[in-house]
Image (spheres, rainbow, N blue to C red):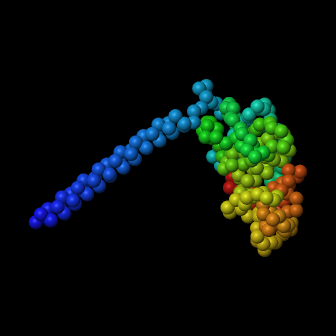
Amino acid sequence: MEEGADISEEVQNNRAGSRKSLYIVLVAFFAILIVLGIFLYFKSPTLPSEGLNCKTILSNGEPDGKIDIVFFFNGVSEKEADDYISYIDEVEPFKANKDKFNFYSVNYNPSCNIQNGILICYSRELMQASSVCPNDYVIVLTRQSASIRSSAYTNLMSLNVASQKSVLIHEFGHVFANLADEYVPSTIPRGSKNCVSSCDSFKSGNQGCFKGCSKDSYYRPVETGVMRTLSTSNYGAFDEKIVQENLAKYV
């Protein structure tokens, strides 16, 4: 009986210890949640105290069904947007579809950084500011040295105005049609169709098949297209068809 009593007491002590440990874990968990909440609150994006306004640069109809592009300016004049709009309106396949675009701007000056020679203007604050306009895609224009490369991330294009205007349709090819870079080296986005492991992947009627497309061992559909070099404004037949298929989704 005494031995049984000792065992029962030990079990009770173990249970009490387990409950105490669980209590400590729960208190620590909720304390972490509170601290994290406070941190996120103070780190959440804050917009300028003055009101943000959406300015219509060019409208071709109601935002629904159109490709809505919002411009931001970092150290450059808002007039820079006019040059890019004029450019895209004269380059195929956009020229034949220019009535599918609306262009806006917001009076917010975003911050841009240079990382490994690449221009990056993405921030939570910028994306929040873009929400004052109808927006499918966002463009930040800024002037850097000519050696700084532009970039695309999600639906944002960070453009160095010191580059050739064709940088616009190169980066737009990334965000709008999921086109991969046709130079080497680069990273092939998931689902991209213009960099392939075999020429058999290209349909008949294409301009050709050329080795070197993001990876040395992959192939591109055009020898010299805008996804390879900014010295041209031509996507090539295969890439242009992909862009055109996406444009067809809009009215």
Q: Relative to 137, does residue 184 appear above or below in the rendering? A: below
Q: Residue at x 78, y 63 (%)?
A: 215
Compared across the picture, whether 231 is left or right of 67 comes to right
Q: In this view, does 2 lie above or below 117?
A: below
The residue furthest front is: 2
Q: Is residue 207 above or below residue 43?
A: below
Residue extending farthest left: 1
When asked about the image quadrant of residue 242, the answer is: bottom right
167 is higher (above) or lower (below) than 188: above
Q: Which of 63 and 241 is in front in this view?
A: 241
Residue placed furthest toward the bottom? 200
Q: In this view, does 30 lie to the left or right of 106?
A: left
Of residues 226 and 185, the one nearer the viewer is 185
* Residue at image point 39% right, 45% down: 28
Quarter occupied by residue 179: bottom right
Q: Judge from the rendering whether residue 36 lies leftward or rightward of residue 16; answer left or right.
A: right
Q: Position of residue 30 (x, y in %)?
A: 39, 44
Quadrant holding the N terminus:
bottom left
**What residue is shown at x 63% (from left), y 46% (from top)?**
64
Residue 182 visible? The answer is no
Q: How many labels does the image show?
A: 0
Along the viewing direction, whichever of 207 and 1 lies nearer the viewer: 1
Q: Is residue 215 visible?
A: yes
Image location of residue 23, percent across then percent down:
31, 48
Which residue is painted at 80% across and 36% down in the image? Answer: 143
Rendering coords of residue 81 (x, y %): 78, 37
Closer-to-camera residue (4/235): 4
Q: Which percent across, then down, holds residue 140? A: 73, 39
